[in-house]
Amino acid sequence: MAEHIPGTDTPDNEPQTVSVPDKPALEGLESKLSARWREEGTYAFEPDTVRDEVYSIDTPPPTASGSLHVGHMFSYTQTDVMARYKRMTGKNVFYPMGWDDNGLPTERRVQNYYGVRCDPTKPYDADYRPPAKAAKNQRDFDVVSRRNFIELCEELAVEDEKVFEDLFSTLGLSVDWNRTYRTIDDHSRAVSQRAFLDNLRAGDAYMAEAPTLWDVTFRTAVAQAELEDREQPGAYHRVSFHAPDGENIYIETTRPELLPACVALVAHPDDERYQRLFGTTVKSPLFDVEVEVKAHPLAKPDKGSGIAMICTFGDLTDVTWWRELNLPTRAVIGRDGRILADTPEWIATETAKENYAAIATKTVFSAKETVVEMLRESGDLDGEPKKITHPVNFFEKGDKPLEVVTSRQWYIRNGGRDEERRERLIARGKEIDFHPAFMRSRYENWIEGLNGDWLVSRQRFFGVPVPVWYPLDAAGNPDYDHPVLPDSASLPVDPAAEPAPGYEESARNQPNGFIGDADVLDTWATSSLTPQIVGGWSVDEDLFAKVFPFDLRPQGHDIIRTWLFSSVVRADALNAAAPWKHAAISGWILDPDRKKMSKSKGNVVVPTDVLNEFGSDAVRYWAASAKLGADTAYEIAQMKIGRRLAIKLLNASKFVLNLGATEKNVALADTSVITNALDLALLAQLTDVVNAATSAFERYDYAKALQLTESFFWSFTDDYVELIKDRAYGAAGDAEQASVLATLATTLDALLRLFAPFLPFATEEVWGWWRAGSVHRAPWPNVDGLAAAVEDADAGILGTVAAALGGIRKAKSEAKVKQRTEVLKATVTAPEGAVARLRAGQADLRAAGNVRELNLAVGEGELTVSDVELAPPAE
């Protein structure tokens, strides 16, 4: 066996008493054993350790805003299987759990659950309680202060997390529940703010006034990683700009409402149609603004008319052109998604001002309709709009297309504008072993496609505050270039509610006083620090040195571009290292229509229903049957197989132990008692299975380990156990009985350990019938002690003898007699090698088949059973 772990076995002179229930059952095991594991600290991390002994897991903190779905059970089980295996190999497993409860998802849930919305200008009400029944229409929601709103977020998130913890315990996650965190608790906020300030001091974080992707519904900036393209209906409008000589220059645009924001026309440098215009100016229709015609290689000659208008800003390509061509900024869309009320100074003629007034304060949709009608009337619309469907940028949680507005935001450098940093982050990715390996390309492709730094500030209420204040000059204008920063010991801070260091609260918003940054950090800016948060970075450096870099980051493939990449960015900047050694990437759960299951799609399955119907071991079996990275269908049939396996494990173990196998029979230390060829054949197979399963686990191929173990288990129960019953009862003498009992005990012992990561409840239940301690603190099976005993064993004996027994039983079934009916004689014909195997197992074959005379004949082809003569039925 592997190194002994105290408490897992009783001393040799105090054997564990075998106590097998009359009717083993899966029902009730989850609650009973989960409580015991917590009480006994079965999965507790031992802090008195060294790094080489530790296996640390950067567990994904699920979003605590609503409910878990079956996809969580799928991916978290896969992580837990690895955690349990590593613990059994002797590792001190650091396996925490976090709850991602800051940010937009929690805000949305609180708004809808309580029927409230936040107004930061409203004073705090210490006695406020939300209405007993939330209003359905947002216009009827209670309006509460920022502080009241945050308190409601805290309250609901805590309640959600209790439900999540109970479900994960029921699922059997071997988490150390003494090591939990919330991404909004004081510790996480302090770590997140400290990391941001470190980034700021190192020049890795900065503030800039720049074009920003903006969600008009949530009134917040959006980062590149939060985008998704959605196909939307639209139309191309062919619109004429006017050259000084009277020539009309036609552009085609899907956004005519942005004509007042036009700053240039652009065509490809090699496009002969427009080369004569480069450097000249034309006037925009309706708004009479003079704009220059520019050349840029991003212009597409084969798209539309080949020349496009650049507006500030219609899309991200406009941003690129604006930046690279050094164009002016003429923004006309506000943060509310409406056209700005005041006429811009660049719109000068009376007619142009009247036209602008016609669209001022309108939504972009209404403004578009108005502009198109005005273009018809002026004759600047050539033909009717051509309807199209095209991809449009959305915030992944949003309902309306994103706008690009100019705003002052905080950024963290991520290689999007820095080739050297980009190459360094790609190199960091190569320090991580991805499972499956091809997932690394998704990481690298994301980095190579970045077009800007990571925007981390958000205009929300519930989150980690940006820990910065700004001094105000004598006129009350903020000095953004000289922010006031807190000292590390004072973290976490809330600049919107606390005065800046060196100021009194009365100086807030006053000339020569200060203002606090009102924004919060993107939730990914905190989640990207989960290794640092749970590992004790900047707080418990001794612990951090024992767990960092973490051994494993498990996560879904859809957030490689967000969580995985951002975590590498932070660890590179803060720790000059990759944050983990391995990244295990799970696939999606697909519904019957092969679509991803997600709460937003409304096609999820509630975990409690599945767990109640099939049991946790069955659900875990389904999850662990899928390889990493593979999208997997939600299959009830697979769970039914898992439940059948767990029940069979209980019943087969009961049968084996009732045959007389005990802890004292486990023969790994002394195999001399095992003399029967059939027994040695089984143990040879067991040796191969243990070695292959171990190798598979080390490759993070737990699904292969399960498949190998399950296949061997069914051979053990269906073939071996059926063949050796007579010997187990002593019919062949003491020596043969000792051989078979040692084989049974040794095999059951190993099978329980092999199955323990997958079926923790059934294996723990059986372990308690005949062994002390917990199977989950027992060593992983080590069959080195069997090597010498099985070196010359023929592992094929069991399968050959089982095939012959199957033929005999088939003959009885076809004759419609009971299986215990005596066979007076039978002939088994097989190739010479198979006949030799049959001779080695002949005694067990005759006993199991109740065969009086067995003839073995050498022949070609497959093994066959013939000339079966059955005893006549008793009168």
Image: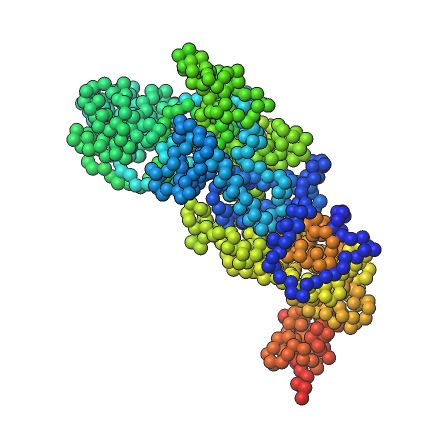
Asked if one can make out residue 771 in the rendered structure from this viewpoint, the answer is yes
Residue appearing at x 41%, y 47% in the figure: 601
Total tally of numbered discs in the picture: 0
As displayed, is residue 395 above or below residue 345?
A: below
Judging depth in this view, the residue of 691 and 126 nearest the camera is 126
As displayed, is residue 675 above or below residue 159?
A: below
Instruction: Estimate the x, y position of residue 283 in percent, counting from the top left.
Output: 23, 22
Instruction: Estimate the x, y position of residue 849 in percent, counting from the top left.
Output: 69, 75
Extreme residue in the front direction = 127
Q: Quadrant of residue 292?
A: top left
Q: Quadrant of residue 12?
A: bottom right
Q: Does 702 sit left or right of 735 as displayed?
A: left
Tell me the quadrant of the picture where the C terminus can be found: bottom right
Extreme residue in the bottom direction = 875
Q: Quadrant of residue 754?
A: bottom right
Judging depth in this view, the residue of 862 and 764 nearest the camera is 764
Instruction: Estimate the x, y position of residue 659 in percent, counting from the top left.
Output: 73, 67
Residue appearing at x 69%, y 37% in the figure: 47
Residue appearing at x 68%, y 84% in the figure: 871
Q: Does 8 sit left or right of 574 as displayed?
A: right
Q: Does 752 sit left or right of 347 as displayed?
A: right
Q: How is the image coloured?
A: rainbow
Instruction: Estimate the x, y position of residue 156 in percent, counting from the top left.
Output: 49, 40
Extreme residue in the right direction = 13
Residue appearing at x 75%, y 68% in the figure: 728
As displayed, is residue 515 above or below residue 251?
A: above
Asked if one can make out residue 225 in the rendered structure from this viewpoint, the answer is no
Judging depth in this view, the residue of 251 and 494 nearest the camera is 494
